[in-house]
Image (tube, rainbow, N blue to C red):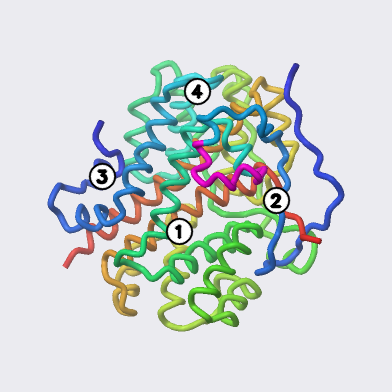
Amino acid sequence: MNDVIDTLVGIAPGSKLDAIRAQRSEARKHAQASYVSLFEPRDRGGVTADERQAVAAFVAGLHGEPRTNAFYAAKLPAGLSAAVAAAVAAAGSNGPYGRFPKGPLSAEDAPGPTWKVSEAGRKALGPRLAAAFEHTHMLVFHPRDAAPPSLQRLLDAGWSTTDIVTLSQLVSFLAYQIRVVAGLRVLAGSQT
Amino acid sequence: MSDKTLTPPPHTEPVVFTRDMLDWLPWLEPMAEQDMTERHLASLVDASRVKSPYFRLLARDPDVLEARTRTDKDIFYNPEAGLPRAERELAAAATSRLNGCIYCASVHARFAATYSKRVDDVQRLLDEGVGAKLDERWDAIVAASVALTALPIAFGPQHVDRLRAVGLDDAAIADLIGAASFFNWANRLMLSLGEPATQG
């Protein structure tokens, strides 16, 4: 398939940015391989395709970068569109926030909310995805607040340890991919 | 049998950003070395990483780990053109400082200090945070990393202009975007799957 970052940035073959990305051909190839291994995996393990796309659409919605948001929204199963849109609308925030370990850094604490899925959202998403969305919100906006109880809530909702690794990679990869797209689009628009 | 979170053994939690070597203690069970197949071992890329609980945990999804690692290595280690290694590491350290990843910041502050030989400036970034005044070039790199890390993402043409004004060409700016963005990936894994510990 086409390189997702190139497509979303709008990098044409032979353009200046195409040449610049070609100088980091391994990073380009393996950023794409990361995408494929998360969204078209050889082995889906315990995380369904719908779960992967639902979390991705939620992450992209929270970041608000228009191209990636449209890309992942278009891949969302129709039955989940309304629930994901409602979660994005309810969960938006600024980041990164969170607390530091108690000590000198406490002066820099920027406490903020731990977001919970609404009752209606929980019904629409089901307990497994609802738990994943709550964890995802923390990972996106306030990752330094992470603690074992947030992982325990995923385990309690039926995510295995291996599933959690995949979920964590998926959200964290998107935090990378979306920023690369946003950054390279700015650079592409600043060509002299 | 359902999985459980791990309770790390007694340890001292670092409470400041530091260039010291730290340990990392997982909150979920890494793979046992004897349970790892050839595919799992290959996903580590560097065989020595089998000693790392972080990489043995991520090896549970080997295809993603291998792709992540090969992305990482090219962004930071590829010596061809672009941003000097010291400043790729500076972008990683600044991103980690803002997100609050004490472990990641320690590793990449050490690298930034080693490659730039500007130990005091790197330490001031750790001590004072991303608002520390370093010099025009480093301040522009830190500010761009911060703008890429913030949500909503605040990176704009003014950052590109400022980076060009301090001597970065477009290949160097693309490297900066890669390095800061990559640490938004790495920070989230290190912060959410375990915790740092002081060594010794």
Instruction: Identify the secondary structure beneath mark 4.
Output: helix
**Image height of A91 relative to A145, above or below:** above
Camera-side residue of A182 and B186: B186
Q: Which chain carries label 3?
A: A
> B93 left or right of A35?
right
Three-letter residue code for mark 3 = Asp
Kind of residue at disc 1: Ala
Asked if the residues shown at circle 3 and circle 4 are in contact, with their CB atoms under 8 angstroms apart, the answer is: no
**B110, A187: nearer the viewer:** B110
Q: Nearer the viewer, mark 2 or mark 1?
A: 2
| Alpha carbon separation for disc pair 3 and 4 | 25 Å
What residue is pinned by disc 1? B180
Q: Is residue B28 above or below residue A126?
A: below
Going by the numbered disc 4, the residue's amino acid type is: Glu
Cα separation, mark 3 vs mark 1, equals 18 Å
Marks 3, 4 in one chain? yes
- Which image quadrant is residue A103 in? bottom right
Both on one chain, marks 2 and 1?
Answer: yes
User: What subunit carries mark 1?
Assistant: B
Residue topped by disc 3? A6
Chief SS of the magenta region: helix
Residue A176 image position (x, y, % from top left)? 44, 48
Same chain for mark 2 and mark 4? The answer is: no
In magenta, the rendered stretch is: B42-53
Whether residue A46 appears in magenta in the rendering, the answer is no
| Mark-to-mark CA distance, 2 and 3 | 35 Å
Residue A30: percent from left, percent from top: 37, 42
| Circle 1 SS class | helix
Q: Which of marks 2 and 3 is in front?
A: 2
In the rendered structure, are the residues bearing label 2 and label 3 in contact, judged by CB atoms less than 8 Å apart? no
Disc 1 and disc 4 on one polypeptide chain = no
